[in-house]
Amino acid sequence: MMDSNGDMQFGIGAAAFEQNTASAVGQLVQTRLMLWGGEWFADTTDGMPWRTQVLGEHTTSTYDAAVRARILDTTGVQKIRAYRSTLASRTLSIAANITTSFGSASVQASSG
């Protein structure tokens, strides 16, 4: 599990893990959204295309599609029930309600 700062929690035994729950899928979506393309050394092809399709000039027509595709490509996600994005001061904030294999979950992420 992650704390309110997005850091992994350790030292609390089995309570530190989510498995087969809607919130586990939500956490996976959030983690996948926060992974920048090329950032992970084990697979530099994975990640959100923040630099090319989300942030920067002339991305207004591409960033929502890129975010939605990343959410829907996450294991356990069945559909996006609600989605909202806000671009302000070069920071994209995302809020989504998703239907997972285990129920509903809410996801929030930000580029900044």
Image (cartoon, rainbow, N blue to C red):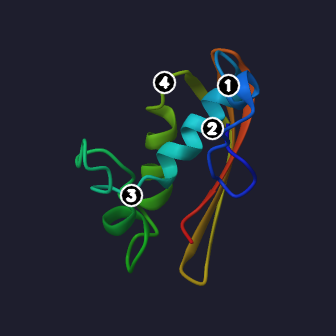
Label annotation for residue 18: 1
- Determine which quarter of the picture holds residue 27: top right
Question: Which residue does the numbered mark 3 point to in the structure image?
Answer: 36
Q: Which residue lies furthest to the bottom in this view?
A: 89
At label 1, which amino acid type do we have?
Glu
Dot 3, crowdedness within 10 Å: few (<14), some or many (≥20)?
Answer: some
Specify which label sits upstream in the sequence, 4 or 1.
1
User: Which secondary structure, mark 2?
Assistant: helix
Q: Name the residue under label 2.
A: 27
Q: Earlier in the sequence, mark 3 or mark 4?
A: 3
- Left or right: residue 108 versus residue 89 is right
Image point (65%, 35%), residue name:
26
Judging depth in this view, the residue of 62 and 40 nearest the camera is 40
5 over 87 or under it: above or below: above
* Residue type indicated by callout 3: Trp
Q: Please state which of the two labelled residues, at mark 4 or mark 1, is closer to the viewer.
A: 1
Which amino acid, mark 4? Thr
Specify the quadrant that holds the N terminus. top right
Whole-percent x and y of residue 33? 50, 49
Q: Which of 35 and 11 is in front in this view?
A: 11
- Label 4 vs label 1: CA separation? 15 Å
Residue at figure coordinates x 57%, y 74% from the top left: 91
